[in-house]
Image (tube, grey):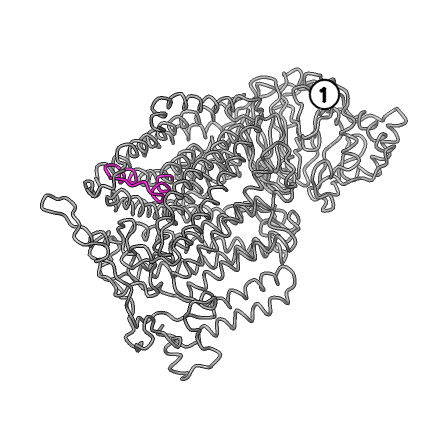
Amino acid sequence: MIRKYLRTRGPTAVGLGVLTFLTGCAADAELDTLNPQGPSARSIDNLFDPVFYVAVVVFIFVFAGTFIIWWRFRDDHDDEEFPHQFHGDTRLELAWTIVPTLILVVISVFTLITLRGLNETEANAVTIEVGGTATQWEPEVVVVGQQWWWEFRYYLNGLDGVDLTDARHLPPADIVTANQMVIPAGEEIELSVTSRDVIHSFWIPALNGKKDAAPGRVHPWKLEADEPGVYFGQCTEFCGLSHSRMRMQVVAVTLDDFAAWVAEQLQPAAEPQAAAAQRGMEIYQSQCARCHVIDGFNDNDGADLVANAAPNLTHLMSRTTYAGGIFNMYEPDGSLDRTQLEAWLRNSPAEKPAYAEGRRGMPAMGLDEGQIDDVVAYLTTLGRAPSLDVIAATEVE
Amino acid sequence: MTATTTVEDVVGQPLGVYTRPRGGNGWRDWITTVDHKKIGILYGVAALFFFVVGGIEALLIRLQLATPNGTVLGADMYNQVFTMHGVTMIFLAAMPLSAAFANYLIPLQIGARDVALPRLNALSFWVFLAGGIVLNLSWVLGGAPDGGWFGYAPNTGIVFSPSPGMDFYALGLQMTGIASLVSSINLTVTILNMRAPGMTLFRMPVFTWMILVTQLLLVFAMPVIAVALFLLAFSRLFGARFFDPSVGGDALLWQHLFWIFGHPEVYILILPSFGIISEVIPTFSRKPIFGYPFMVFSGIAIGFMGWGVWAHHMFVSGIGPISVAAFSLSTMFIAVPTGVKILNWMATMWGGRIKFSAPMLFAVGVVSMFTIGGLSGVTHAISPADTQQTDTYYIVAHFHYVIFGGIIFGLFAGLYFWWPKVFGHQLSDLIGKVNFWVMLVGFNLTFGPMHVLGLQGMARRIDSYSPGFGFEFWNMVSTIGSFLIALSIAIFVVNVIRSAMKAKGQPPCGPDPWDARSLEWLTPNPTPVHDFDEIPVVESLDEFWHRKYGTDENGRVVRVASAEEVCQDGSAVGVHLPSPSFWPIVFAAGLPFIALGLIFNLWLTVPGGLLVVMAIYAWVFEPVDDPDAAHGDVSEVADTTEEAPVV
């Protein structure tokens, strides 16, 4: 019965299986590894795809062989007759040693070529305005992982002479932001990846493979996005309690937009005018400044945390996610998602698992509702909201 | 043996406290036994128990991940559960289940009466069990390990993992490591020195060969993990800072040590399974194994090459591009000897008259499922692709196809195949077939979709995922599949119980239920306590089969003797066997006190240490023989001591 069914319906069943497989892949998958949006990811995909097909061919070969064996050499009759007893064949053995070896030699050549490409960097530069003068900047971003968020540091005079070996005491950077890395599209961005505590892994699948962020080590890596857009990522080295809630995005923008972003980020925070915001600023000073930094308000002499750092809040409102990229700052209509932000300020360990008592993660600050309103009023003065397009594209669920 | 004899000569009459226990059949016998068969059964029972424990942990993981933002386990509990799932399945289920087969079968396959060092064999088991208990005690003593089975520093340090869980990990695994190391030396010596007359190395069954390669891998791999675990234990317990870069330590040191052990460990796990199906496939194909020397040498090649691929676990860890290139190539080419094995198994089946009984189905399951795992392995041996795939569910899919598809299926083939050898009755073949198909479907439903999830970018070791990444459907499928696997294990348990009940009061099954090939079937089922009535003289590979069959003038296979005629009847009397001993279990009982003492209160190490020291002294000074050292007929004088011949 089954055999007859398989003979008649086999191809249909296989086709359906493949179709289901593909539908699964085609879903709204922002982390899809098979949808490269930049040259590095594309070179990886171009290597993976043919190897995958070779693997499929071998798979079919072995499975067809197994099926034929089951079909032809099955003994249903308890036959006493023995089959021909052969013990081996050296020529066959040599053949199936040498043929796979040759296939692998070919694959290894392409692997080495791809590997070389992934480790080469080009000399490129973009024009940005620093302190009123236009300068050429070779795009490089320092990526720093810590439990459980990412920091991105931009040194606009280049990394020559910048000592990154101790990630817990990094030299001051021109721009320090968190969870969203803003880059110019179409330009190769060199990354220096490191960590302030445990090992993390920085991964934007659409743009490149991953690279571990390890304490005491600075790992070179690179990214390039073909087009402006938002590319999602997820920490991929197990880093403790909230590993799953350590996400990031790369926001690639046009060169002009990037220059504008840089100019904006270079501005220190201004004194708030409204009374509520001023009260909020006082609360910030007494409670939050122990760990956080706002350029132009308090300086960076280390945070009271194991990682020695908390997100720089100078341009908090220019970022659309917070707390390791898991919450939206804005509603789809561009208004502040006040409920979530207040909940975070009220009792952050309840919103995202952390070991606040072990100085890893933001503790519950014990603010009353009035104080929370004041802090929100102050925070909303820090930086300018991005466009609705960016808010929509960066939305997390 | 000679050493203790000398001691006895010097001491004269042994002190009463050191009297050796008598053999028997009660619980006392089980805890004092040095019989390789009983130790094999103990290993098997313990391993299957831990397999169920690890399986329950797996089901909890799948329940948590069945839907987005799962709430079955919290983040903290999830991290403990996935860590213990890995630790339990690798160190407490797969390794000891292989050890169960090795212990039970190696002496039988080489024609010996026991392993070379029987008390040490018992020690291995009890230390392993103590290690497994210590690891699982963590659940009730402050929290299980939460740093992953791979335990990457510095996340396992006291700052980042303040619960005592990782202490239990460091000390518990140290104990199972001691057990493996002791056992590997024992089995290596046994295989090299205790083979029956005529059992040359190249007449050894492939299973024995694979176990030999496995033991040699263990001998060299276990010290490495021992060092790593000591560094971890000293870091956590005594403030050492080997992995802390701020004082000159190195976070990557752990990774190198762990994977120099960890990758050979993969072959330590898989080679016994390869050995098992290399016995099963020829038996049911009714043909000799195709290319015996190639099977042996490909196994040896895997054993050697397995030492040169560890850094493929570290392609994104920040080792330089030259290292990445080198390890990428070595990893690709280890696929060659593995592929040779697959094709040899297929060539063994090709042209056979195959009986697809339950053991054969599981063996064919290994050939096909392991192939999938091997092929996905090649797709991330190409290191650039691995930078996308590593630490995603694609890897989880890959190694479950290797470990479940390659190892668990193989071990089940072995369970069904050798069950009558061990217990004297067969498991129901029909239920066994159902068991296989349910497991095969459940396995593919569970781990097949993980390929897709991984390529879609789902990271490993995340306790929850958000909706909107396209992970929902396949995670649900995977969870459903995992419960089918659980069902298949339940079917196996039912099969075991039902077959045992049906066999009760019945005479044992015949000596040769499968028309088998190798020497262990020369003994009756179940194997008598003394194994062989007389040590056989071996004339060829597949000795047992060649005693049953010859060829006629046309070269056709004809039966020359029935299995009943060929098999020994187990009636030998007065066979001198190694005597039971209290001290292996006493030694092992001391270790948990030392471990708990190091974690909680150093004073506890005192009774633990005293137990260990006492056990060692007693071990040395106990008399050579128990009061009835000769088995079978106790009236017979035991001076016809039969040492297993050495070839």
Residue A193 part of the magenta-drawn span: no
Q: Quadrant of the image for the N terminus of chain A?
A: top left
Q: Is residue B349 magenta?
A: yes
Q: Return the x and y of residue A92 as percentages of the image width and height.
A: 23, 36
Span of residues in magenta: B344-365
Quadrant of residue B570 within the rendered picture: bottom left
Does B12 sit left or right of A297 as displayed?
left
Left or right placement of residue B81 versus residue A321 in this view: left
Seen in the picture, residue A129 relative to B387 is either above or below; the reply is above
In the rendered image, the vertical position of residue B25 relative to residue B226, given as above or below? below
Choose between A29 and B445: the one closer to the eye: B445
* Image quadrant in which the C terminus of chain A is located: top right
Residue ID for mark 1? A263
The image shows residue B497 at horizontal and vertical percentages of 45, 51
Q: Residues within 10 Å of mark 1 (few under 14, many from 20)?
A: some
Q: Amino acid at mark 1?
A: Ala
User: Residue B512 or B613: which is nearer the viewer?
Assistant: B512
